[in-house]
Amino acid sequence: MSVRRRVGVQVSSMVVSVFVVAGCAGNVSLSGDGPSSSSSGKSSKKGDKGSERTARKELAGLKEAKPDSMTGYSRRQFGPAWKDVDHNGCDTRNDILARDLDDAKKRNKCVVISGTLDDPYTGKQITFAKAHAVEVQIDHIFPLGLAWRMGADHWTEEKRTELANDRDNLLAVWGRPNEQKSDKGPSEWQPQKSFQCTYAEKFIAVADEYHLSVTQADHDELGDMLDTC
């Protein structure tokens, strides 16, 4: 059983306008026990596939390894953000907004201009308004920097681009916890307790799909998260 490190954080419940950006920064962990997010049920194949039983089987099959260095890493190594990988005429960022926001409204078929986000990481509800954008980001559940250290540095750029734009590795989330999460693995950062089961299932499914290694500490923490299912 891994030792969990958590920092309690008081989060303002003020409704804020939001901005969608790619990438992550920051280094403070945040976790809470707010209400579960309705958006957590909107993902596709890997999230649906990720029942607790399946996740535990996949977790047992993941290779454990020590992380390599970040030498040579940059966001550009994972292709441009964001691509139209499903050829629907819309970029991945707007696809994720349309999927994860409630009552999403679009301009010109693709550009999401308003909606409501139930942040899965904290349980906070955020009103999205593109005209006053500041707070929402698209998070990579298995962070790209961590993926680089756990094997993606040896991939082709095409495969790295696929991971970066994989809808099943992406969530629209509140910017603050996303920046605090940065490129941390599960042993260093956890979402609110009520989302930990879903988070672990998604993380494990992506690692299994792309044959990414995990650290021993992350492996142990993922097991702990599955215990909350």
Image (cartoon, helix red, strand yellow):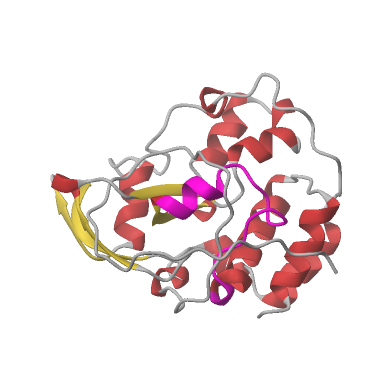
In the image, residue 5 sits, relative to residue 52, either above or below, namely above
Q: Residue at x 80, y 37 (%)?
A: 67
Task: Examine the rendered structure and indicate whether residue 228 appears above or below residue 115.
Answer: below
Check the picture and name the quadrant holding the N terminus. bottom right
Q: Splitting the image into 4 quarters, where does residue 120 fall?
A: bottom left
Which quadrant of the structure image shows residue 90?
A: top left
Q: Position of residue 210 (x, y in %)?
A: 69, 45
Residue projecting furthest to the top: 72
* Quadrant of residue 16 within the rendered picture: bottom left
Q: Is residue 129 visible?
A: yes
Please report the residue visible at 49 percent of the width from the left and 40 percent of the height from the top: 24
- Is residue 125 shown left or right of residue 72? left
Q: Residue at x 42, y 68 (%)?
A: 42
* The C terminus, quarter of image: bottom right
- As rendered, which of 188 and 229 lies closer to the eye? 188
Q: Decide whether residue 163 is among the magenta residues.
A: no
Counting from the top left corner in percent of width and height, residue 149 is at 73, 34
Nearest the camera: 161 or 137?
A: 137
When the figure is inspected, residue 78 is found, relative to residue 114, above or below; the finding is above
Nearer to me, 8 or 119: 8
Location of residue 196 in the rendering, given as x and y in whole percent from the top left corner: 61, 70
Question: In this picture, which residue range is highlighted in magenta?
Answer: 176-194
Residue 178 in magenta? yes
Query: Left or right of 108: which side holds 127?
Result: right
Q: In the rendered view, tell whether residue 43 sits above or below residue 53.
A: above
Q: Is residue 109 visible?
A: no
> Residue 54, image x and y in percent?
72, 71
Which residue is at 30% across, 47% downward?
Answer: 94
